[in-house]
Image: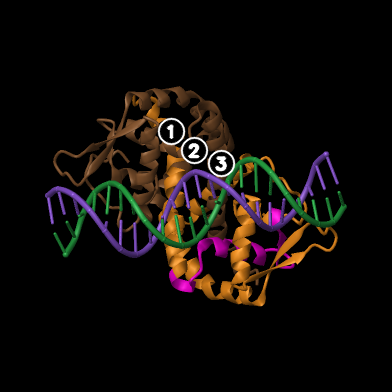
Chain colours: A orange, B brown, C green, D purple
Amino acid sequence: VSSTCDDPRITAFGMLIEAHAAIAGAVGRDLEEAGGMPVAWFEVLIRLARTPGDRLRMSELAGQVALSTSGLTRLVDRVEAAGLIARETCPSDRRGAYAVLTDAGRDALAKVMPAHVESLERRLVDAVGQEGLVQLTEHLRAIRDANRRPGVTFASCPGVD
Amino acid sequence: VSSTCDDPRITAFGMLIEAHAAIAGAVGRDLEEAGGMPVAWFEVLIRLARTPGDRLRMSELAGQVALSTSGLTRLVDRVEAAGLIARETCPSDRRGAYAVLTDAGRDALAKVMPAHVESLERRLVDAVGQEGLVQLTEHLRAIRDANRRPGVTFASCPGVD
DNA sequence: CAAGATTGAATAGTCAATCTTT
DNA sequence: AAAGATTGACTATTCAATCTTG
């Protein structure tokens, strides 16, 4: 039975699932402690902060945080209710909406950032090393790019991956 | 604002989230097509098939598939209802339960395996290469090991990572 | 009373259908 | 009629509480 079970591809895939769950869980707990913020919220805030104008279209943001558009709508609902982001209708295309970082959101982000970076240093860099971090990032980027969702092409907004 | 936002540690973490979602989604869709089986079911079956006796304690299995014990209880409920695994009480400690692969489960696994491996070859190996796959696996293993959940130590059952 | 597993209540996510604008 | 976003119905997961056995 076991012949194909130890296939390196299957092992790699299983490891991706385990590693993701382990570190997302651990970093999430760190973040809750530090700033009382779910890791999904942080991902939204940081993606916005990285973008010129501190704003991103809903679809684009959905792709970046790896959620369906409906999942993102609900996540944005929650973060907006907390006052950390706001919605703005796109002036040039009134079907579209932007999620925009508020001042409170910028502050919240700045507040948790040091603890978060320290958490990542400990949980990520200590595990794989400086050099490993670079390798790992490139591999993961290749995997992401090779497996983007069919629908989520969306090429507007300047590409700040 | 943007200074710390492009920190390589933050980028790496974000990439892990995106890559995981992208490939888990894609492979999951492939698997549904091929064998009509959710990827979570496959993860359960393969972990059992890799173990001597084709059985694993509930807690141990929970750790391996990256679920809480209650999450695993429910997943096992579903897979058991489909007849692919069965529960057995542990003879030496009647608090504990084993999840055991059934013949039907072994068959189902064998049936989807070729398509699954082909899917991984395309989506994983084509993206990072043969050599990359090995590097990636080791990095992920390091991350997993460095961030195991506090409660999920559980040292019984022979260790077939 | 601690450990292993399960259950209840609550949360977050998905897919399919809908609404608005192009 | 297609694109962007939202909503409704449903599924899967978690945390906290419970039950059983050691």
Q: The numbered mark 1 sits on a residue in which chain?
A: A
Estimate the x, y position of residue B140 in percent, counting from the top left.
44, 47
**Residue identifier under label 1:** A8
Estimate the x, y position of residue A105 in percent, counting from the top left.
62, 73
Please name the amino acid that badge 1 sits on. Pro
**Residue identifier under label 3:** B25
Q: Is residue B133 placed above or below A78 in the rendered structure? A: above
> For the magenta stretch, what is the residue range?
A33-59
Of the pair D11 and B118, the residue shown nearer to us? D11
The picture quadrant where one finds residue A29 is bottom left
Residue B125 in view: yes
Please name the amino acid that badge 3 sits on. Gly
The picture quadrant where one finds residue B40 is top left
For the N terminus of chain A, the image quarter is: top left
Of the pair B99 and B115, the residue shown nearer to us? B99
Please name the amino acid that badge 2 sits on. Leu
- Residue depth check, mark 2 versus mark 3: number of the one nearer the observer: 3
Residues beneath discs 3 and 1 located on the same chain: no
Secondary structure at numbered mark 1: helix
